[in-house]
Image (tube, grey):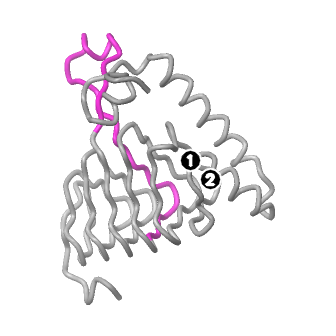
Amino acid sequence: MSDGSEREKMLAGADYDAGDAELLALRQRARRLCQRLNALDPADTATQQALTAELLGVDSSDAFITPPFFCDYGLHLKLGARAYFNAGCTVLDVAPVTIGEHVLIGPAVQIYTALHPLDARRRRAGVESGAPVAIGDDVWIGGAAVICPGVTIGAGAVIGAGSVVTRDVPPGVFAAGNPCRVIRRLGDASA
């Protein structure tokens, strides 16, 4: 990756050209790996762990992704120890997605970092940007929740099923709704 590459711009949150050849090749790589992962026999956990490690670019032997799973790149997704994705999740990782330890992500959860311009001319030109998502340790995200670009979810938080998280969620709370809002504080966030 050279100085000022489209990938560097993308990861920095700057405007970038989504049609760049390097980015196209990396997305195709991720799609092929996801396709292989999603077609595996559920009992073939060794191959599943190997494919997950290849997709993420790191050893992920203590994290688990239940297929089907979809992502843009995989290489920008960092999973903490014993992080778990249930079936049907999608991660649009044009910006870094950092998931802490012991995080439970319910089925059909969507995590988005991709942003598109409001101006139609810029969208037609293929201009995109992104904002990172960070999920702290011991978070539980209920099924079908949507995590929007730029959001941080604090350690020990619980996100209700079907929520649309558009802004940061503090640690140790139960938050739910569309848009997601804090409903109440929980007990000890580390428990």
Circle number at residue 57 = 1
Badge 2 crowding class, 10 Å Cα cut-off, few under 14, some 14 to 19, many 20 or more, is some
Residue type at tag 1: Gly
Judge whether 26 appears above or below 77 on screen. Answer: above
Per the image, is 116 magenta? yes
Q: CA distance from mark 1 to mark 2?
A: 6 Å
Badge 1 crowding class, 10 Å Cα cut-off, few under 14, some 14 to 19, many 20 or more, is some
> Which residue shows up at 59% across the image and 37% down it?
30
> Which residue shows up at 25% across the image and 14% down it?
122
Residue type at tag 2: Ala
> Which residue shows up at 37% across the image and 46% down it?
96
Q: Report whether 98 appears left or right of 56.
A: left
Q: Examine the image and state in which quarter residue 27 appears.
A: top right
Q: Examine the image and state in which quarter residue 129 appears.
A: top left
Judge whether 93 appears above or below 118 on screen. Answer: below
Q: Are marks 1 and 2 in contact (CB under 8 Å)?
A: yes
Query: Label 2, on which residue?
Result: 53
Q: Which residues are magenta?
A: 103-130
Residue 154: where, in percent of width, then height? Answer: 26, 68
Per the image, is 106 magenta? yes
Q: Secondary structure at mark 1?
A: loop
Judge whether 182 appears above or below 111 on screen. Answer: below
